[in-house]
Amino acid sequence: MAVYIVGHKSPDTDSVCSAIAYAELKKKLGEEAIPARQGELNPETAFVLEKFGFSVPELLTDGEGKKVILVDHSEVSQTLDNIDKAEIVEIVDHHKIGDITTPNPIFYLNMPVGSTATVVKKLYDEHGVEIPQNVAGILLASILSDTVILKSATTTDADVKTAEELAKIAGIGDIQELGMEMFKKKSDLEGKSPRDLLFRDFKDFNMSGNKVGIGQIEVVSLSLLDEFKEPLYEEMKKVKEEGGYHSIFLMLTDIIQEGTELLSVTDDPSVVKRAFDKELEGKSVWLPGVMSRKKQVVPFFEKAFA
Amino acid sequence: MAVYIVGHKSPDTDSVCSAIAYAELKKKLGEEAIPARQGELNPETAFVLEKFGFSVPELLTDGEGKKVILVDHSEVSQTLDNIDKAEIVEIVDHHKIGDITTPNPIFYLNMPVGSTATVVKKLYDEHGVEIPQNVAGILLASILSDTVILKSATTTDADVKTAEELAKIAGIGDIQELGMEMFKKKSDLEGKSPRDLLFRDFKDFNMSGNKVGIGQIEVVSLSLLDEFKEPLYEEMKKVKEEGGYHSIFLMLTDIIQEGTELLSVTDDPSVVKRAFDKELEGKSVWLPGVMSRKKQVVPFFEKAFA
């Protein structure tokens, strides 16, 4: 039975491209592997796949009866429906260790680096498999996407080194240029509904028993979001109600100014104060230097909720 | 702050020796690391440490305020007390993925191989660090212990290859001889109380909300256990009561005959039937070929309880 390789819900570039690249490695190792995605591609990911000549992977949202490798997540709330009826055979990730468990021993590699793509590149090297030029392209794009062009706090030496090696293989002379091209696509908000924007990159967490949703929109300038803020806030209130959330946070991240405006709809505004030692000013709070949900937001909320 | 490296409760040879060997690697990489154990050594482990010239690691049972690397387990029920007040910085293991989670991304490597020692050996190789002769000895002993001298169902090609490489480094000509020497120590039951024997290698599991304890005693001949069976069974009943268990199982494993007599004290004997398709005969059931708790017992009970 072929194994499906799939990233998290609300897929981002790293989640989709790491699945594709890891499936390519598995095929080269003689295993049947099918890359998949759990939802619509964001404009950045669509651009990256087209640029490097990959087709859009199969949509897979239900794990029942499937053999699966999970990439770029290890949280039940972010994975396939009916994951308890799937057979998880591997996990390759770079996040905090989530609540997915397995009945059998499996291969699980999680590294504290900037992107799952960095881990996938390491697995190519470990198996002594040469990385095809187009695969190097999407892996590089994944690193640039997840690390905000190697600038976010999650960026490690391994990411920088890996990005340089991949750029060489992919024949890309200017990493910065590719990164900016991608982030301009990501900043393209035209014609999108508030709900589309909110769920473009949105993750659920179980924090000490509380359902917490944290989304992120990265733009090259916050002013691009001026007209969207109010409708986004209204949408967050609706989603909070519908989904029975304790809190919904939306990171509006300015990748040039390097900071995040955190929009907050919550049953308990004091969690923001406890997490960041700053009071909400109206609907949001400005967090200078904060660009990474994983490293600079989630752990602080985990503590605040504990 | 130095990091403590520690295996599971009721420590076995792999749990203790992998902690020591990984601490040695960390030290060679310039990090401060202290190997630890969560309980008394069993006679086999004591023999191995003495044979290869290592002192008994520090006792550590409470994680509060400590920085820790967990080896050979990933289950909350098997780890340090107050693990939520510890900082887990790495996990290196070879079991099913357990319920330990972290607030931050960490290095987590789990491989479906016969022992954690096999994974630790791989980490030495990855870092290009030469394995000292005595460290090779305890790593080899760990593999032999966990794989019943490379015979159990969990044994992989990687374990066999690693054992051969380690034997060469350790200067051990006859792997089989070392293994039998170890298992004779393990089979030495003289002067032990039923409680000591039951807890020598005992693990707690949360199976679909039910507290299940599974112990194992490995001997070179089941007849060695004849006089212990009745007192062990009585002890299991006591422990079940005291600890609020749904079930307590004790694997009496004959490593020569290659099979296990499973002693069972349970609220629902049908789980044994569902797990192994064999009825209990009185207090136990004979399971031919079954030698591994991890691969041949735990997954089947997980399913039976699901």
Image (cartoon, coloured by chain):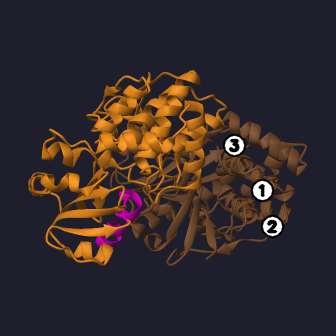
Chain colours: A brown, B orange
Task: Give the residue number, with chain letter if any, for mark 1.
Answer: A138
Residue type at mark 2 is: Phe
- Region of the chain picked out in magenta, as a range: B290-306
Question: Which chain does the residue under circle 2 lie in?
Answer: A
Q: Secondary structure at mark 1?
A: helix
Q: Image check: B65 left or right of A250?
A: left
Q: Are marks 1 and 2 in contact (CB under 8 Å)?
A: yes
Q: Are marks 3 and 2 in contact (CB under 8 Å)?
A: no
Real-space Cα distance between discs 1 and 2? 9 Å
Q: Are marks 1 and 3 in contact (CB under 8 Å)?
A: no
- Determine the image quadrant of residue B280: bottom left
- Is residue B7 in view? no
Residue visible at 38% across and 58% down? B292
Binning the other alpha carbons within 10 Å of mark 3 as few (below 14), some (14 to 19) or many (20 upward) gives many
User: Residue A116 or A297: which is nearer the viewer?
Assistant: A116
Residue B159 is situated, as x and y percent measured from the top left of the image, at: 55, 49
Q: Secondary structure at mark 2?
A: loop
Q: Is residue B145 above or below residue A8?
A: above
Marking on residue A54: 2
- Say whether disc 1 or disc 3 marks the residue closer to the N-terminus: 1
Q: Image check: A94 left or right of B74?
A: right
